[in-house]
């Protein structure tokens, strides 16, 4: 994030960063601390040790060791955050579902945004997004920031991905607000599968322009044909975008389901951070 700017989002009183203690979480941790610093946010750092019935017998000692390591890790992460922030709370949980516990904690604490890494230490190469992160995005009660390990967010060049859905409109308003606060370059992209649908793409991108004009923000538009996730991620890379903003679900998305969606695929391919907006 550009350190010369104030908080880029309109409301970020509470921020939770969920980490599996792998290096894949590093981008999310760094971004969360920076956002909390600029937004004067209350920061929660959270890690979950997943358990299963096998731990009750042969794996009991392993579980205890992993829990001890998690507590020590959170203590060091809290100390790191306190070097830049006035306060930080560490949260350790164990249970059968990391994603469920993260979402429950976010709801209980009424956080405004969750930050997560793109792929956890148990992720497979053929899986674009770690299953825990995907489930957090799908079920979270708030927006979710997904940050690749090496990504740095400057909010200088933002890409809005839109398919005209209600979720995409929410994402567009979020991006417009960020651009207004940070003086960002803003581009709206809509991708369809065939030339016959290209006029729809122009209409969807045009809707973003109209919303931006009301806020006094100019927007460039792109209406392209191809596989949406490939075009969106590729365009972001070629343009030097540092933040993609999109909705959790598209027009064909199912409630509470993310795996396999365009959003998940974009997150898996993009070299920059992706902010997934949620309808309040």
Image (spheres, grey):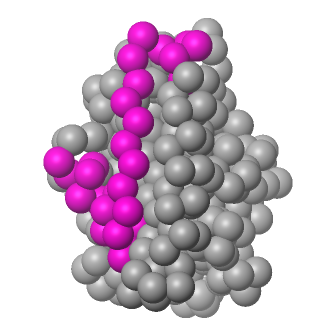
* Res. 249 image quadrant: bottom left
Q: Nearer the viewer, residue 47 or 69?
A: 69
Q: Is residue 173 left or right of residue 81?
A: left
Residue 201 in picture, x, y percent from top left? 50, 71
Quick check: can you spot residue 136?
no
Which quarter of the image is occupied by the N terminus? Answer: top right
User: Above or below — where is 132 with respect to 31?
Assistant: below
Residue 212 in picture, x, y percent from top left? 39, 38
Is residue 246 found inside the magenta-colored segment of the image? no
Is residue 90 found inside the magenta-colored segment of the image? yes
> What is the number of callouts on the image?
0
Residue at x 37% of width, y 30% of height: 89
Residue at x 20% of width, y 51% of height: 107
* Res. 41 image quadrant: top left
Q: Nearer the viewer, residue 105 or 148?
A: 105
Residue at x 59% of width, y 50% of height: 69
Q: Which residues are magenta?
A: 81-108
User: Above or below — where is 38 with respect to 15?
Assistant: above
Residue 4 in picture, x, y percent from top left? 61, 9
Q: Is residue 108 left or right of residue 253?
A: left
User: Above or below — where is 191 with respect to 19?
Assistant: below
Residue at x 76% of width, y 65% of height: 234
Q: Nearer the viewer, residue 80 or 280?
A: 80
* Res. 79 image quadrant: top right
Quick check: can you spot residue 254?
yes
Q: Is residue 262 left or right of residue 43?
A: right
Residue 276 in picture, x, y percent from top left? 43, 56
């Amino acid at each position: 994030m550009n350190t010369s700017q104030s908080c880029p989002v309109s409301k970020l009183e509470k921020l939770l960063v969920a980490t599996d203690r792998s290096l894949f979480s590093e981008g999310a941790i760094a971004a969360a601390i920076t956002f909390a610093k600029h937004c004067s946010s209350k920061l929660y750092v959270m890690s979950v040790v997943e358990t299963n019935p096998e731990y009750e017998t042969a794996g009991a000692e392993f579980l205890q060791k992993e829990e001890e390591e998690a507590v020590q890790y959170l203590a060091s992460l809290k100390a790191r955050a306190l070097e830049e922030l006035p306060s930080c709370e560490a949260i350790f949980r164990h249970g059968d579902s990391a994603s469920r516990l993260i979402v429950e904690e976010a709801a209980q604490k009424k956080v405004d945004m969750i930050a997560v890494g793109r792929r956890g230490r148990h992720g497979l190469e053929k899986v674009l997004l770690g299953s825990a992160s995907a489930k957090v995005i799908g079920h979270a009660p708030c927006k979710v920031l997904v940050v690749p390990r090496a990504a740095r967010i400057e909010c200088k060049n933002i890409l809005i991905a839109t398919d005209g859905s209600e979720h995409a409109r929410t994402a567009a308003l979020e991006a417009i607000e960020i651009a207004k606060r940070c003086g960002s370059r803003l581009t709206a992209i809509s991708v369809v599968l065939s030339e016959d649908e290209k006029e729809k793409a122009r209409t969807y991108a045009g809707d973003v322009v109209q919303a931006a004009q009301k806020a006094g923000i100019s927007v460039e538009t792109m209406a392209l044909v191809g596989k949406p996730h490939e075009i969106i991620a590729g365009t972001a890379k070629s343009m030097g975008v540092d933040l993609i903003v999109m909705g959790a679900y598209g027009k064909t998305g199912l409630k509470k389901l993310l795996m396999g969606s365009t959003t998940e695929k974009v997150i898996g391919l993009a070299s920059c951070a992706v902010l997934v907006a949620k309808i309040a």
